[in-house]
Image: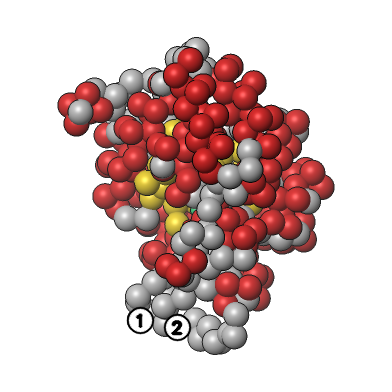
Amino acid sequence: EGRRLAELAHAPTRTRDDAPIRLFANAELAGDVAQARAHGADGIGLYRTEFLFLQRHHLPDEDEQFQAYRDLVLGMGGLPVTIRTLDLGADKADTTGLALTSEPNPALGMRGVRLSMKRPALFATQMRAILRASAYGPIRILVPMVTNSLEIRAARSLIQICARDLRTEGHEVADHFELGAMIEVPAAAIALPSLIRHVDFVAIGTNDLVQYTLAADRNNDALSELYDPLHPAVLQLLASIIRCGEKHAKPVSLCGEMASDARYTALLIALGLTDFSMHTGALLEVRDAVGRCDRGRLRRLAPRLLKAEDREQLTLLLARAAARA
Ligand code: PEP
Ligand code: MG
């Protein structure tokens, strides 16, 4: 089995009926880049920059961040790299030097882009580092925890200001930037038709989208039964995000854990997903699962999948589709 999967490392990712699917890697650590390339990832779909900030005694300055982002881009050898701006707060808060205030309800508090808006100097330092790295290869900028268009517009104007300053200082900066929003708050998912014109792409964060849709803490084991990516409400949201992206010709990827789980590959393809981003250890298994899917058949099954009442019904429908394929 291991050998059979290893042979998929550089095979194209295609369904049985030959539809192309793109598999990107999630990255946090330096080693993830080598692994992403070894397993034939189409690029980095999510680089979680908060790992440069966590468990440290001081904040990384512009140069340190620039070097990390530049190495990442160079390591990917021309493949697209999606760098997410700081998503500190809530479950990612153990950092010193930020003086984060303690909050009664951190998951609903000052996290992600909200913190970046409140600490513009911190955000600008990171943006400058990312923009400087953009001279070395294709970078897309992704903003976490977006709930409204103001946050996206603020990020875009900050990019423009930082790019102009950097050019004035003599730095080389790419001419054009793709800016995207994480869709991980139900409000952003529901209001996407009005938000989408402000972004170049969207990335669905199911880890948080499931948590906020079902009001179930993603890290609370006592709620693991409730925390269900297959809940009909979650599937409705996923389907509508993907449909909205298609309608407006903006790429949609999914970079939560759900994309890494080969048990969900057929379901996500049925909902219309074409771009998956996952931890590098899952790339081969998911590529294998994609190869067993019949996209045309799965797409036709989507309306029934969305009406399924529970996990059992859903699993049964998918199993029947797989048996017929
Ligand atoms: C998510 O919420 O699904 C996501 C990819 O971001 P994180 O897990 O870093 O919150
Ligand atoms: Mg998230």
Q: Earlier in the sequence, mark 1 or mark 2?
A: 1
What residue sits right under mark 2 in the picture? 97
Q: Residue flagged by tag 2: what amino acid is it?
A: Gly
Q: Secondary structure at mark 1?
A: loop
CB within 8 Å, label 1 to label 2: yes
- Looking at the picture, which amino acid does disc 1 mark? His
The image quadrant of residue 201 is top right
Between 240 and 309, the one lying in front of the other is 309
Q: Position of residue 214 (x, y in %)?
A: 62, 60
Does residue 142 appear in this view? no
Residue 268 spot, x, y in % from top left: 54, 35
Q: State the residue lying farthest toward the right.
A: 194
Q: Is residue 262 visible?
A: yes
Crowding near the residue tagged with mark 2, few <14, some 14–19, many ≥20 C-alpha atoms within 10 Å: few
Q: Secondary structure at mark 2?
A: loop
Residue that label 1 marks: 57
Distance of label 1 from label 2 (alpha carbons): 7 Å
Residue 168 lies, in percent from the top left, at 61, 56
Residue 273 shown left or right of residue 23 in the figure: right
Relative depth, front residue between 21 and 313: 313
Please tell me which residue is depicted at 49% across the width and 66% down the height of the picture. Answer: 223
Q: Quadrant of residue 151?
A: bottom right
- Residue 71's place in the image compared with 90, above or below, is above
